[in-house]
Each structure stands twice: as structure tokens, then as C-alpha cells.
Image: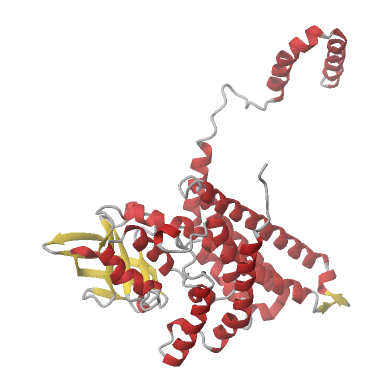
Amino acid sequence: MAWDFSTEPEFQEKLDWVKQFCEEKVEPLDHVFPHAVRSPDPVVKAYVRELQQEVRDQGLWAIFLDRELGGPGFGQLKLALLNEIIGRYPGAPQMFGAAAPDTGNIEMLAAYGTEEQKKRWLEPLLNQDIFSAYSMTEPQGGSDPNLFETHAVRDGDEWVINGEKWFTSAGRVSDILFVMCTNGMFVVPRDTPGVEIMPEPRNHNHIIYRDVRVPLDHLLGPEDGAKVLAQRRLGGGRIHHAMRTIAQCNLAFDMMCERALSRKSHGKVIAEHQMVQEKIAESYAMIRMLRLYVLETAWKIDQTSTQEARTDIAAVKFTMARVLREVSFNALHILGSLGTTDLTPLQAMYANAPTMGIADGVDEVHMATVARRVLRDHAPHEGYFPTEFIPYKREAAWRKMKPVLDARRDLAASAEAYQRYFAIRRR
């Protein structure tokens, strides 16, 4: 039987290289030059390109793309293991050409774009010559596409887009916007007249599209195909996010354990206090269970498809936010007052947990999805009592055992004795 938790030696070498590269080069760069990938300084940009070339030489650039779309085609399981390392370092995803929201937008372009669209937008996005944003959710409808109102109307050789989008992450600093309309997915350059980015929120932008005109060839994929493109974009991406979330949980856990062994309270190191031990044990178990579940889901996608694994993808989505919240909270408490400051990553982790429960669809929606899909594999019982009602099970057991008991009178006598004994006890 094939049941294995090991990693092939060749791929483990890749993972080891990624870990060392992130520790020795990416993490220092994050602290000396925050947001180095987007730096306008040509000297910094040149150094970033040098590091990214090392990634390319390892065959690890744009790791999220399937082989048929021009990427390395690792599959979701290997990709999950890579993201478990990359997710620990804020600047690592961009250093590997694998940062959201560009990843999902690149995947849509690679899968559905025309050759001209790929040349115009895909190549520059892959090379990080331009950056993109995904403009999907709306103020009145959240992430439910059935409630969206943003619409494109064809007018001669142009599309005219009107609507309002809420929480377009990094929209203000993007070059192109992927706008989900009720009748299609459109690529809109940010500087197009009519694109109005509101002053707040600063990072997750509120954008009004007011008579925004784009050429006909800015429609990505088929007309009325926005939902299909969106599902393609979000499905596997949730596995990436989950493994990067686990990386953050592991970072919080390491900080928690280090602090527990370093500080004293009431005459002993706090690691010896039972309440601290409880937080460490619970955090350890939560992380390990989530990790195994995410890796199993990634394996299932590789063996079948994103659609077949939809129930587990949804369950992973709402579970990862909960685990991040609990683990970061535990770590924050063990670090005490220091954990409440911005002098460690913990405060940002804990603040990000609610966002993880909302991004890519609120957790409640995914919970409802899981419940509905799971219930399809079950049926109601007949009568007043469930199938596990013990009197029913006992009656059925006697029917099943009757041929054996009829053939073996000694066994039948023992069964009858047992029946009399339990009948007396039930009186």
C-alpha cells in the first residue's frame, strides 16, 4: 500500500536550498531594504535581480505555475512544502516570483489569455516589470458574485465599465487591475480615465469604476466567464495561503518556546508552569494537525482536481485562520508585554488572523459549503430513532448471527445466557 510521508531526496535538496537562501539572503534584505522588489532605486533593484537569478537557476521561479502554463509544474504537494518555508519570510514570495495577487492573475492569463494578451501582460508580470491587483469584492455584496453589480457594456470597439469595488489589495500600487464584472473578467490599466481610488483604506483599496473604457481585447477569457476564471484563480491559491499561514504559526511557536525557556516567574522558568505548557502543547497539536490536513488536500488535488477537492479546500480555508489566531495569541501571551508591541512579528500575526478569515471569502461561507457538500454523502434515518440506536443494532445483530447460532448450539446457548444476563441488568 502506498502510504508515505517522506520527501524524495532530490526535492529535499531543493527545500534545503530554499531554506538556506531565505535565511542568508532574503531575511537580511527584508530588514535592510523593506519592499525591495518594488524599490525605485536602480542599485537595489539590480541586487534584487541578482538574487532572483539565483532562484531562476534553481528552477524555482514562478513555482505556482503548471508545466503546461510555462512553470515548473511541481504540483500542489511539492508547492505546499515550498510555501511552508517561503511563508516564514515576508519578502520571500516576491523573490520567488510567487506573490499574491500577481500569482492568481498570472495563472488566469496563462490559462485563458490570448497570445497577444500574454505578450502584453503575462511576460511583464512574470518578470516583475509590472504589478497587478485583483478587483473582485464589492461594498454591498462582499465576495458573493451573485450580488455583484459592476458591469461592462459593449460600445463599439470598447467596453464601458461601471461599478464599485471594495478591498482591492495593492490596487493603488498596481499597474493593471483584473476587474471581475457580472459579465466577464477585464484587464484595466490603473491609469485609465474613470478609475477612482478612494483615499481609504490605504492598502486594501476602495475603487470606483466610472465609465471606464477599455478596448474589446481587454476581456480575459470568454464573455460571462468570470466565475470560472475566479474559481481557477482561488482554488489552488488557498493551499499556498494555508502553508504560508503554517509557516507563520511555526514562527510564532518557535518564539513561544524560546521565550518559555528564557524567562523566569515565581522562582522557575515559565516553561515549567503548567498553564504555559498547556499553551505550548495545544499550539503544537493544532499546527501539526493543520499541516497534515493541508498536505493531504494538496495531495488530493494532485491525484484528482481542484474541483474534486473542493470540500477539503474550503475546510482548510476556515481552519487556517482559526489556528493562526490561537497560536499567535498563545505566543503573544507567553511573551507578555513585549508581544503586544511591534518589536516582534506576533502583533502583526494576531492582527492578521481576522483578515485571513475574510480574505478569499469569509469563513462562514466556506463552513456552509463544507456542511452542504458533506451532507450530500449522508441520508436521513427512518422512524424516530437513528441507525445507531442500540436496540435496533442488537436486533440486527441477532438476525445476522442466526445462521451461526443455528449451526452451533453451544455458541447459541452462550448467547442466550448473555441475553438473559443483560436483560436482568436492564430491569
Say if 29 sits above or below 310 in the image: below
Q: Determine the residue positioned at 30% across, 69% down.
A: 119
Q: Nearer the viewer, residue 328 or 14?
A: 14
Circle count? 0
The x and y percentages for residue 242 are 56, 61
Q: In the image, is 183 to the left or to the right of 96?
A: left
The x and y percentages for residue 410 are 88, 10
The x and y percentages for residue 426 are 82, 21
Q: In the image, is 232 to the left or to the right of 421?
A: left
Q: In the image, is 53 to the left or to the right of 102?
A: right
Q: In the image, is 337 to the left or to the right of 125?
A: right
Q: Determine the residue positioned at 81% across, 71% down.
A: 271
Q: Determine the residue positioned at 28% across, 71% down.
A: 120
Scheme of image coloration = secondary structure
Give the quarter of the image for residue 15. Answer: bottom right
Give the quarter of the image for residue 265. Answer: bottom right
Indicate the quadrant containing the N terminus: top left, top right, bottom left or bottom right: top right
Give the quarter of the image for residue 207. Answer: bottom left
Indicate the quadrant containing the C terminus: top left, top right, bottom left or bottom right: top right
- Residue 138 seen anywhere in this rendered image of the structure: no
Q: Determine the residue positioned at 49% across, 87% down.
A: 47
- Name the residue at the left extreme: 156
- Residue 191 seen anywhere in this rendered image of the structure: yes
Q: Nearer the viewer, residue 5 or 348?
A: 5
The x and y percentages for residue 368 are 49, 47
Q: Nearer the viewer, residue 87 or 271?
A: 87
